[in-house]
Image (cartoon, rainbow, N blue to C red):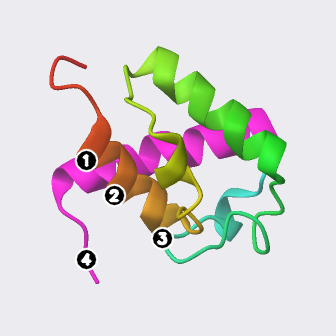
Amino acid sequence: MSVDTNDEEILQAIIQYLVEDFEIPEEKIHLDANLFTDLELDSVDALDWFATMETEINLSIVEKDLKKIRTVRDVVAYVKKNRSADS
């Protein structure tokens, strides 16, 4: 499945963050990578990451929705759907 330009920009930002802040090798990060099993994030890491995105890119966080996020693709879709228009 391909991604559009906006999705690709979001994906690249996610990759950069995971590489820089969690020291995850870039080659492990792809759309279908599971955040918890493939990338070895724990729930605290994920919450910290979303709190950072909430601040840095003006992402609207809905806690019940976060429980559904499992893959990098899920993160891209969530950011695309919930990011404020002015960010």
> Can you tell which mark lies on residue 2?
4
Instruction: State the separation of the CA atoms marked 3 and 4.
Output: 10 Å
> Residue 48, relative to residue 64: is it above or below?
above
Q: Say which of 76 and 43 sits in front.
A: 43
Q: Which residue is mark 2?
A: 77
In the rendered structure, which disc, 3 or 4, sits on the residue that comes first in sequence? 4
- Tell me which amino acid carries mark 4: Ser
Q: Which residues are magenta?
A: 1-23
- For the residue carrying disc 1, how many other residues have a C-alpha within 10 Å: few (<14), some (14-19), or many (20+)? few
Q: Which residue is mark 3?
A: 31
The nearer-to-camera label among 1 and 3 is 1
> Residue 31, relative to residue 18: is it above or below?
below
Q: Say which of 32 and 61 sits in front.
A: 61
In the rendered structure, which disc, 4 or 1, sits on the residue that comes first in sequence? 4
> Can you tell which mark lies on residue 81?
1
Instruction: State the separation of the CA atoms marked 4 and 2.
Output: 13 Å
Locate residue 49 relative to residue 24 in the image: left or right. left
In the rendered structure, which disc, 1 or 3, sits on the residue that comes first in sequence? 3
Q: Is residue 23 visible?
A: no
